[in-house]
Image (cartoon, rainbow, N blue to C red):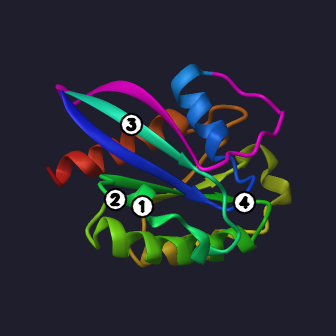
Amino acid sequence: MLNKKICMLGSMAVGKTSLIRRFVDSLFSDDYLSTVGVKISKKNLALDGRELNMMLWDLEGQDDYGDINTSYLKGASGLLLVIDGTRGSTLTQALEMRESALKVAGAGTPHLFLINKTDLRSEWQVSDAVLGALRDKGCEVLEVSAKTGENVEKAFELIAKLMLETV
């Protein structure tokens, strides 16, 4: 079985913990609990005939990318950068966090942008044009909802596939 560390990065209240909880426990709660430091969850995943032990590091939300505790990023096999579609500033912050994180984890570390809250699509401040531009730059972008579960399993399977391609 392969062990892989995946770090969840993003601003405060973008839904990192909710996405992990939906993936690991198939649960969602509207109650907001701020993560302090890091919380580690795990889930085993069978993918393409391989067993993968996913260690999910839920890093506390930061609204200033310079505040990321880089020691948490060491040894990361993958990064999930979470953006709140209803708060456009979280995209800019995620882009900045990616740059800082890749300096620590390594430039070739697989990463994926998750645009959360598709259930609130009518309130989004992140436009399809901006998402298209990200994709045109070669970024992996997936629209998800921790609340409804839309594309959550797919997101974790995609980061797993990207990590397995680099093994």
Relative horizontal placement of residue 110, taking residue 141 as reference (left or right) = left
Q: Which residues are magenta?
A: 27-50
Which comes before the other along the chain, label 4 or label 2?
A: 2
| Viewer-side residue, 10 vs 150 | 10
**Residue 151 placement (x, y as % from top left):** 55, 39
Q: Is residue 119 above or below residue 1?
A: below
Q: CA distance from mark 1 to mark 2?
A: 6 Å
Q: CA distance from mark 4 to mark 1?
A: 28 Å
Q: Name the amino acid, label 1.
A: Ser
Q: Name the amino acid, label 2.
A: Lys
SS at mark 1? helix
**Residue 20 placement (x, y as % from top left):** 56, 36
Q: Name the amino acid, label 3.
A: Met
Which comes before the other along the chain, label 2 or label 3?
A: 3
Q: Which residue is mark 3?
A: 55
Determine the image quadrant of residue 35. top right
Is 24 in the magenta? no
Q: CA distance from mark 4 to mark 2?
A: 28 Å
SS at mark 2? loop
SS at mark 3? strand
Q: Are marks 1 and 2 in contact (CB under 8 Å)?
A: yes
